[in-house]
Amino acid sequence: MPAPDHFWMALNQHAESRPTRTALQDDNGSLTYGELPGQIVDRSKRLSEAGCRRVALALENGCEWILWDLALLHTDLVCIPMPTFFSAGQVTHLLASADVDTVIGDLPGGVDPAQLGFRRTSLGWQRPTSSMPSTAAAIPEGTCKITFTSGTTGHPKGVCLGANALMAVALSLQAACAEVTPERHLVLLPLGVLLDNIGVYAALLAGASIQLPEHSGVRNNTLDIQRLSQVLQQAQPHSLVLVPQLLHGLLRAAEAGIQLPTSLRFIAVGGGRIAPALLDQAARLHWPVYEGYGLSECASVVCLNRPAQHRPGSVGKALPHVSISIAADGEVLVHGSGPLGYLGSVDPVPSPWPTGDIGRLDDGYLTILGRKKNQFITAFGRNVNPEWVEAELTSDPAIAQAFVHGEALPSNLALLVVADPAHVSHAQIKAVIARANTDLPAYARVHHWLVISQPFTAANGLLTSNGRLRREAIFQQYQQALLDLLPEESTHEIF
């Protein structure tokens, strides 16, 4: 049975067997499983009657986001989630390159849809075909969602995905979580990013109640721990999806006496490498943290640890819908899942999909060692994956973020963001670096560093939507500061 058919059948079965169970709940109200199919059909009719083709969802997290997303899936129209943190330039690029004819919600970045040819309608904003850009890119047949990632450049890249790929991941996630039967799922990450969007599909397949607070304490990769603590205690969720930075923040909060609710059964963490020390800390607190790995091109999750198959330090085994292999140069290859293509690209889609990540397989468990393109070569000819070193540095609660650079240099340099500048001394930072260096080989150790006052965020363009460092942007902004760290006789080697 095709994956989308299985999804709709599951929703109809839930509507019959558990009609009064809450399906979706946000700050404004709730919707039961018995009510859900009718709400989806109603929105599907409105989309069809309005002649929509490609629809940008520019809503905050909430029931409406999910209902419109499901209606677009049900109507075989193209959904383009709009990340709320996009700049004005990124918003206009997304609308033009994806040939968007309808916007539901308010555009971020202060962009006025009327200035781009859109008109107010009962759905939101629409523009006639005659005003559409003539250079808009065609999309691969079967595309149901175009997910944009900020990546490492200013222009976001559109990944075209089919319904079968999305639902294959959701089915695998449902199976992976079935051991702990989560019945309440709390959405903390923005739905404009794929990770928790897929998590919602998996929760719906399982018939779980999904809680969608608009103000959860998590926004643009920043954390309001007091607000998040209130949300967690009120929701009493069984499952969560986090990025590493948020796990780091929750662990810091735990040290200050703020505890997670005991209801939690499954905390999936992905989007970047997690330092082993953080996983050890979570284990000591008996938090059910399971590290995973994925990428937008493969419709999000590829590998995931789960209760019966858990190896800390790895990102787990491949989910049932895919398999993993390692190329001769160490690159992780994904078999059985890939995008339909990139928006605007005519290049054939490679199979297996080359992830760009360097990894290792042990008994089926995948360990990610770093990004292939981020690997730098020191002046002594040694290859270093900076994520490895950065993870060691941020494993200490005193360091919130780290950026390591050493291309063609005799010594490695680091930019550090301190978690609590008012209470962390220079001596403490020096001790953190000394401890990290003890666990690193000589060629990977940090020799010079600079504490910077502003964190890397998506808002300032130095972090991607899923919490990864935008390395080129960071290097360009701090190039002179890094240069000044080097001893005078070595400064010529930074180039």
Image (tube, helix red, strand yellow):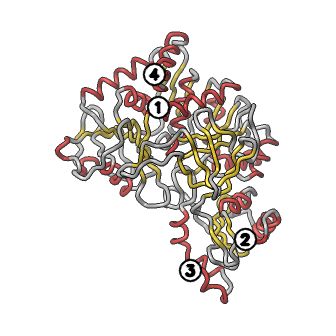
Question: Is 488 situated left or right of 17 in this image?
Answer: right
Q: Nearer the viewer, residue 285 or 72?
A: 72
Q: Could you tell me residue 166's position as x and y percent? A: 49, 34
Find the distance from the CA under tag 3 to the CA under tag 1. Answer: 46 Å
Taking the spot 53% from the left edge, 35% from the top edge, the residue there is 198
Question: Is 367 situated left or right of 128 in this image?
Answer: right
Residue under pointer 4 = 5
Amino acid carrying label 4: it is: Asp
Find the distance from the CA under tag 4 to the CA under tag 3. Answer: 55 Å
The correct choice, above or below, for 202 with respect to 99 in the image is: above
Find the distance from the CA under tag 2 to the CA under tag 1. Answer: 45 Å
Residue under pointer 1 = 164
Find the distance from the CA under tag 3 to the CA under tag 2. Answer: 18 Å
Residue at disc 1, secondary structure: helix
Residue under pointer 3 = 495
Residue at the farthest top position: 16
Q: Nearer the viewer, residue 446 or 433?
A: 446
Residue under pointer 2 = 446
Q: Quadrant of residue 303?
A: top right
Question: Is 111 situated left or right of 273 in this image?
Answer: left
> Cβ–Cβ below 8 Å for labels 4 and 3?
no
> Cβ–Cβ below 8 Å for labels 3 and 2?
no
> Cβ–Cβ below 8 Å for labels 2 and 1?
no
Find the distance from the CA under tag 4 to the CA under tag 2. Answer: 53 Å
Mark 2 Cα shell of 10 Å, populated few (<14), some (14-19), many (≥20): many
Mark 4 Cα shell of 10 Å, populated few (<14), some (14-19), many (≥20): few
Q: Could you tell me residue 177's position as x and y percent? A: 66, 29
Pick whichever of labels 2 and 1 is earlier in the sequence: 1
Amino acid carrying label 3: it is: Phe
The correct choice, above or below, for 261 with respect to 443 in the image is: above
